[in-house]
Image (cartoon, rainbow, N blue to C red):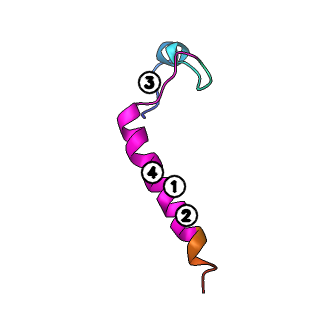
Amino acid sequence: MAAPRTPEKAARLPANPSPQFAPDPRPTLRTAPEAVVTAALSALAGPAR
């Protein structure tokens, strides 16, 4: 996400813990399982040689 270009725009952005903030569901649901599988495969592979 690009940074706001003016202080006025920055003031209107909600903070992450804000009830007005919600991630876009499609990329989140596409990326989360990939991250979990990658972490599991890395953990099961054992230490790097």
Q: Which residue lies furthest to the bottom in this view?
A: 49
Q: Pointer 2: what residue? A: 40
Q: Pointer 3: what residue? A: 5
Q: Which of marks 2 and 3 is in front?
A: 2
Q: Pointer 4: what residue? A: 33
Secondary-structure class at tag 2: helix
* Boundaries of the magenta span: 19-42
Above or below, comparing residue 42 to residue 3 in the picture: below
Q: What residue type is labelled 2?
A: Ala
Q: Gap between marks 4 and 1, in whole Å? A: 5 Å
Of label 4 and label 3, which has the lower sequence position? 3
Which image quadrant for residue 27? top left
Q: Gap between marks 2 and 3, in whole Å? A: 40 Å
Q: Nearer the viewer, mark 1 or mark 3?
A: 1
Q: Pointer 1: what residue? A: 36
CB of mark 4 within 8 Å of CB of mark 1? yes
Secondary-structure class at tag 3: loop
Q: Which amino acid does label 3 sit on?
A: Arg
Above or below, comparing residue 43 to residue 36 in the picture: below
Secondary-structure class at tag 4: helix
16 or 34: which is nearer to us?
34
Of label 4 and label 2, which has the lower sequence position? 4
CB of mark 2 within 8 Å of CB of mark 1? yes
